[in-house]
Amino acid sequence: MRFLITNDWHLRFLIPEHRVDNFYETQRSKVLQIFDLARAHKVRAILHAGDLFDSANPSKYVISEYIKLFKKQCPCPFYTVIGQHDINYRALNLINRSAPAILESSEVIYLLGITAEPTVIRDDVSLESVALHGLSFGQTDEVKSVEGAFNVLVAHVSVGDRELFPGHKLTAPRKFLEDHPGFDLCCVGDYHYRFSYKLNNQVILNAGTLVRKSTADKGHRPGVFIFDTQTREYELIPLTIRPDAEVFDATLTQKPSTALFDGLLTALASEKRVSISFDDNLAAVMTEKKVKQPVRDYLARTIHQLRESSRDAREIERK
Ligand SMILES: [Mn+2]
């Protein structure tokens, strides 16, 4: 079976600060290019690894226009997970208020991984089974691969091979594959640059963002992967895009000074608070303030309970 792999569409109406073109139309035309590619390559489904919308509250116009577009033009099932841009406060229990949930209710897309059960697709001719699993941003549920099937994990996770800032600890693509040994293909989103990595029989792909939203994305050439489960081969298909000079504001072409940001990082690093993980930062602050162990234990329990109850609420909401 062939699949089209894509992520981080960040659908929106407003023109980002750095762009000078009709961004909404540009974005819409790229979505149409992807639907055309899915048709041309006869893929079984499109797999999108999260951040379908740019915000938790996109305009109703954007939502209704994309529902229409999916209905009329998407040639195959479309599966996605929830990225942190899709929901408020990064809180998965608010999933039913998200724009992707509205698209799912409109029966134009499917959300993966909200229940523990994977979606299994069977091919009547080759008798091949493909199990699709999903992990939304911050979802820590254990995913179990299905025996006898080709297992695909679609996940919005911070996996990558480039430091975002000095001292940034990130999960390398290889490590993610090692941590998910039962999965033949992992399609990930979150970081907006593209990468692909093979480890024996496993492959991990991030196609990169669909759009160059700011000058920081300059140099990125939007594209999608076509993956074949029989051969385990994949191909990058670049999208037709306009050159940077035509879409970016020329007055903003110079790289902004990072002096302020670097200063902040140095200050944070000196306080050993450089991670973007809440838990790491909390631990660093508690060490610095010499917080006693019973207080630490109490905080750890409370935070754990809060996370558990938000997961329970999510499961109840989905039932
Ligand atoms: Mn994103």
Image (spheres, rainbow, N blue to C red):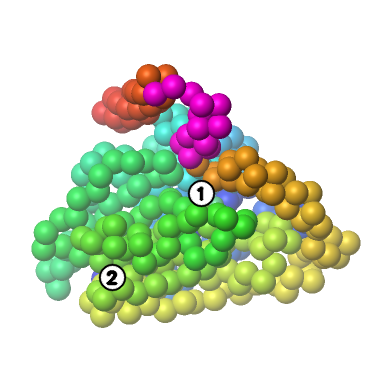
Mark 1 = which residue? 51
Q: Secondary structure at mark 2?
A: strand
The answer to whether residue 14 is left or right of residue 171 is right
* Dot label at residue 247: none
Seen from the viewer's position, the closer of residues 167 and 170 is: 167
Residue depicted at x 43% and y 44%: 137
Q: Which residue is at 50% across, 54% downward?
A: 169
- Depth order, front residue of 179/6: 179
Closer to the eye: label 2 or 1: 2
Q: Nearer the viewer, residue 299 or 184?
A: 299
Name the residue rendered at 67%, 71% in the picture.
Answer: 219
Q: Amino acid at mark 1?
A: Asp
Q: Position of residue 146 (x, y in %)?
A: 15, 56
Q: Amino acid at mark 2?
A: Gln
Q: Which residue is identified by label 2?
A: 202
Establish if 2 lies above or below 285.
below
Q: Earlier in the sequence, mark 2 or mark 1?
A: 1
Question: Mark 2 and mark 1: span between their CA atoms?
Answer: 24 Å
**What residue is shown at x 29% (from left), y 41% (from top)?**
141
Q: Residue 218: say if magenta.
A: no
Q: Is residue 10 above or below residue 304?
A: below
List x then y, in percent, for residue 313: 34, 24
In this view of the protein, can residue 44 be seen by the observer? no
Q: Determine the residue located farthest toward the right in the rendered image.
A: 251
Identify the element where label 1 is drawn. loop
The stretch of residues the image draws in magenta is 278-293
Categorize mark 2 by other alpha carbons within 10 Å: few (<14), some (14-19), many (20+).
many
Q: Main secondary structure of the magenta part?
A: helix
Mark 1 Cβ and ligand 1 under 8 Å apart: yes
Question: Ligand 1: does it lie within 8 Å of the C-beta at label 2?
Answer: no
Left or right, 123 with respect to 172, comes to left
Q: 306 or 82, which lies in front?
A: 306
